Amino acid sequence: MPNVPPWMWMAFWATVLVLLAVDLLAHRGRHGESHRAAIVWSGVWIAAGLLFDVLIWRVLGARAAQEYLAAYFIEKSLSLDNVFVFLVIFRSLAIPTRVQHQVLFLGIFGALVFRALFIFLGAAAMERWGWVSYVFGGILLFTAWRVLRENPAEQSDNKAVRWLAKRLPVTHQLHGKSFIARLADGRRVATPLLLALLGLELTDIVFAVDSVPAAFAITDQTFVLYSSNAFAILGLRALYLVLAGTVGKLRYLHYGLAGVLAFAGLKMVLEPWLHVPPMTSVVIIVALITAAVWASQRARRREARAQGTSRPDTTRKREA
């Protein structure tokens, strides 16, 4: 793979910073966001990520572009797990919709920093010690087994938030958009917004242990890894607002996520003997998530039909 010219890094960061600034300005002073606007913004972030892949293809070649696309789809798929966490944290802390954007924006900005740290350290470790790839593969396979057994949609609270609430002076009342509040006795305490933000950051660090090695299963090129990871993360806020009302109803989604993690883990472990091309990886990842969503929707429709046919029977019994 050709070396990445410095201007590619500058173009990447310029694109990210401009989009973040536009996103921040577009939501300044708003008391919420419509579902239609969230869909539009989600489309903007996806389009930006795919257009950047075109630039990679033109400069670094087709193979780099295919690796970027596969790594992007892996991170985008696994970010659905983050949406579950966002939903649990905001519900458990009773964070209203009008202030969720502020927390999500700062949380995603922090995630960009932590992902950079994980990716650059991981790349350095894999370059120096070849056996690290087997460690990453083992982590992914273990995580796949854990996700298979534990449906995140059934969680009622977040462990990170619960841990923070026991160790920080907190108030359960919101104080506008402030993260720190001063009580009547002069004490400074954390508001639910700060707990939500710290909970998002801590949880994302845990998720990075899974998603970053999954991206390493596709490529070890640092620029491709980080740019694909970043563009997938940047759309998380809009993706959450689009899926917040429906993601909890996708009962089989965690099976698809477990399949993606298991595929990435096996790919890392078996790479010396079995090479899976990047575009084949894309097809497998999309197929796993699509199958999980389809099965969830099919189960919901079947239950809805069952409930619809049982209601007339109940009515007749009451009339009798």
Image (tube, rainbow, N blue to C red):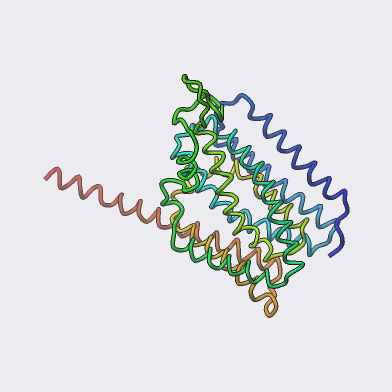
- The quadrant in which residue 270 appears is bottom right
The residue positioned 41% from the left and 52% from the top of the image is: 154
Q: Height in image: 99 above or below 306?
A: above
Q: Height in image: 38 above or below 247?
A: above
**Residue 103 pos. (x, y %):** 58, 36
**Residue 177 pos. (x, y %):** 56, 27
The residue positioned 53% from the left and 60% from the top of the image is: 257
**Residue 308 pos. (x, y %):** 31, 49
Q: Height in image: 185 above or below 10?
A: above
Q: Which residue is most to the left?
A: 320
- The quadrant in which residue 105 appears is top right
The residue positioned 14% from the left and 43% from the top of the image is: 319
- The quadrant in which residue 58 appears is bottom right
The residue positioned 40% from the left and 53% from the top of the image is: 300
Name the one closer to the observer, 59 or 4. 4
- Which of the image's four quarters has the N terminus? bottom right
Q: How many marks?
A: 0
**Residue 280 pos. (x, y %):** 67, 68
Decide if residue 277 is on the left or right side of residue 96.
Answer: right
- Which of the image's four quarters has the C terminus? top left
Q: Height in image: 201 above or below 282?
A: above
Decide if residue 8 is on the left or right side of residue 290.
Answer: right
Name the one closer to the observer, 246 or 313. 246
Decide if residue 157 is on the left or right side of residue 80.
Answer: left
Name the one closer to the observer, 150 or 113. 113
